[in-house]
Image: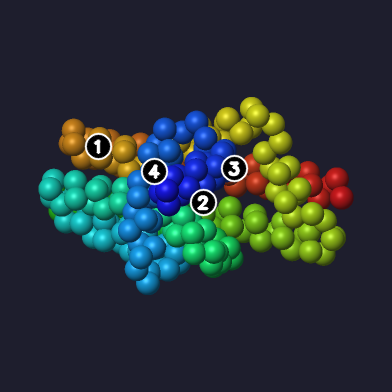
Amino acid sequence: MVIKNMLKEGLARNQEIGKAGSLRSKILRILGVFLARILIVTPITANQVSVLSIISILIAAVLLSLGEFKTSLLAIAILYFGEVLDYTDGVVARHRKKATKMQADFVCRIYHPGMLGFIFAGIGIGTYFATNEPAYIILGFINSLLQQTTVFILELKNAVILNYTENRKRNFKMIREEFIDSSFKKNMAAMSAAPIEWLYFITFVAILFNKIHWYLIFYSVYLFGRLLLYSMYSYKKIKAIEEKG
């Protein structure tokens, strides 16, 4: 009965955040519910579960940096376990009625976009050890820098909007929604984010078929283009919002 209620709440959460039709999200949500059912009988808090998600990425990055096939596959398994943990923390918080929205949001921002740079760095180091080609370690760190710079730009945009709305007494949520104001733009945003959303699966395929060098080249091009687009679009929208007053 407890699991049934948790599943109902979890799938309702999927609907709320716009992922009701995502098979990947549903599977992770269901696994997260079953893991939460185990964790709620322990003293582990929801925020501690979120921290474990962050640690999972660091462990996976170290394993990827070894440049070995078996440890790389283990790293992918750990990354997906971290994804399940990410769907577990909210269920634990809601069940215990101890939701800490600001703390949870802070930790989630570290986990979701903030830690992915370690994955690219780890893969670059691992590929260097496997091939003795310095170009791969350079690509890995370039990809890491591009990812982290994109995160910085997006958070900087949020900070600028927050300051603007505070000074002008405008609605922060309304201003943010102006950044994606049509279904077409929403679809474009989803498409541009797909290589990041499916990063773990793409990494697994690249490792499995020994195409990690093409993986690093692809992401260097993709992340550079993504950074340019996000930066220019954010500036353009901020300018339009300010001119509108």
Asked whether 133 or 70 is in front, the reply is 70
The 10 Å Cα crowd at callout 3, few under 14, some 14 to 19, many 20 or more, is few
Q: From mark 4 to mark 2, how far is it between C-alphas? A: 31 Å
> Along the polypeptide, which appears first: circle 3 or circle 1?
3
State how far apart marks 3 and 4 are (Cα): 16 Å
Residue at image coords 19%, 46%:
73
Packing grade of label 2 (10 A; few <14, some 14-19, many >=20) is: many
> Pointer 3: what residue?
16
User: Seen in the image, is 44 located left or right of residue 70?
Assistant: right
Amino acid type, callout 2: Thr
Q: CA distance from mark 4 to mark 1?
A: 27 Å
Q: Residue furthest top?
A: 184
- The numbered disc on residue 150 is 2
3D distance between C-alphas at marks 3 and 2: 26 Å
Give the mark nearer the N terminus: 3 vs 2. 3
Question: Given this view, does label 3 or label 4 mark the residue nearer the observer?
Answer: 4
